[in-house]
Image: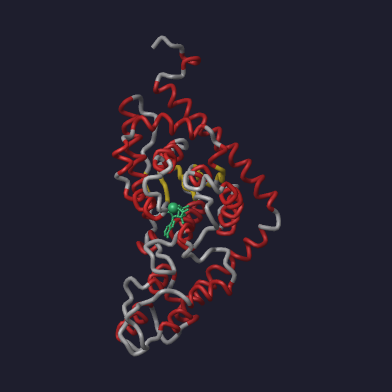
Amino acid sequence: MDIILTGDRPTGKLHLGHYVGSLKRRVEMQNSGKYKDIYIMIADAQALTDNADDINKVRSNIAEVALDYLACGLNPQKSTIYIQSQIPELCELSFYYMNLVTVSRLQRNPTVKTEIQMRNFHQSIPVGFFTYPISQAADITAFKANLVPVGEDQLPMIEQTREIVRSFNTLYQEVLVEPKAVLPENSTCSRLPGLDGAAKMSKSLGNCIYLSDSADEIKKKIQSMFTDPTHLRVQDPGHTENNPVFIYLDAFCRDEHFAAFLPAYQNLDELKAHYQRGGLGDMVVKRFLNEILQNELRPIRERREELAQDLGEIFQMLKIGSEKAQKVAAQTLDEVKTAMGINYFRHGFGD
Ligand code: ATP
Ligand code: MG
């Protein structure tokens, strides 16, 4: 039976990109009851690889991410939710995996390359940041996860993990499991762009609608969204591709939204055709998007506000989850060390 692992960095509250890229899918998988185990990791140690000077940001966002999880429907009775740094076995696994990866292989990782540029690291790349794809391999393999629901930017990490697993299993013994990425069915959701039209909505770029944003904040953010710069007057023909307002509609809009909020059209194709012909203003489209997102985010925000009343309970849930996850990782580490022949005091030095 399948084992799922996935996680998020506590570098900020979770946003719409997380929601459509991974979170929604996790909740569906969890509620299907089809999976053996589901592990959801708050990747605080990974977040520190580019935030070593801002421990408080990472610390304080652990509870925020946990609240976002529960508000979206993750359920600690069904999914193990835990904090990465509380599982020291992950560091030990990473340390052995580091010997199975070359520096040039890490340098070729396209996501890490983009992130290094985004963060203006130039020549001062922290070693921990540079090697985080290896620690991610530890995160996944420690739980023998075979399915990892993620956004598109994570594909190079899953590939790196698969390579490490193959090297390990060939060099030592067949202990580790090769994981597969599970991308959202709707390709728009694999990489939701930012409000500013940047390639990715990202906490680190501040171009996000957060799951916890108030109704007013959501409305303001949508009103100021980037659209088609050539669509100056209402009667001008407009472009729907590379237009974040339409990309968000691709991700969130269903036919029933037209009946409820914009009955002059039957579906998104009709709306797009009108925009492309000319005669449809950005404000009408933005108002429609606002109705859809308000409708989707309202119940999440309300549930989040309720849960935030008792942070003690949230931390207790994380403690129980971390203890459970630690036991599983310890078992894998033991198997890994035995396979490598370094479990000296268990098996002796003889062979
Ligand atoms: P940071 O800027 O700190 O890296 P982030 O916004 O990229 O934060 P992560 O915690 O790195 O968020 O990503 C968690 C998960 O959410 C990953 O599976 C990632 O692929 C997915 N994800 C993040 N941003 C998007 C997005 N804009 N569209 C779709 N999926 C996304
Ligand atoms: Mg990221």
Res 335 → quadrant: top left
Does residue 335 appear anywhere in the picture?
yes
Decide if residue 297 is on the left or right side of residue 22.
right
Q: Residue at x 44, y 69 (%)?
A: 195
Q: Residue at x 36, y 25 (%)?
A: 173
Decide if residue 205 is on the left or right side of residue 322.
left
How far across and down, in percent of the image, does residue 343 sit?
Answer: 46, 19
Q: Residue furthest top?
A: 350
How far across and down, in percent of the image, does residue 277 sit?
Answer: 30, 86
Task: Pick the quarter of the image with the N terminus.
Answer: top left
Dividing the image into four quarters, tell me where ligand 1 lies. Answer: bottom left
Task: Pick the quarter of the image with the C terminus.
Answer: top left
Is residue 173 depicted above or below 15 in this figure? Answer: above
Total number of numbered labels? 0
Decide if residue 127 is on the left or right side of residue 296.
left
Q: Residue at x 31, y 82 (%)?
A: 276
Is residue 39 depicted above or below 69 in this figure? Answer: above
Res 243 → quadrant: bottom left
Is residue 28 depicted above or below 341 in this figure? Answer: below
How far across and down, in percent of the image, does residue 249 sit?
Answer: 41, 72
Q: Residue furthest front?
A: 123
How far across and down, in percent of the image, does residue 188 sit?
Answer: 37, 64
Does residue 1 appear anywhere in the picture?
no
What colour scheme governs how the chains and residues are painted in the rendered image of this protein? secondary structure
User: Observer-nearest residue: 182 or 231?
Assistant: 231
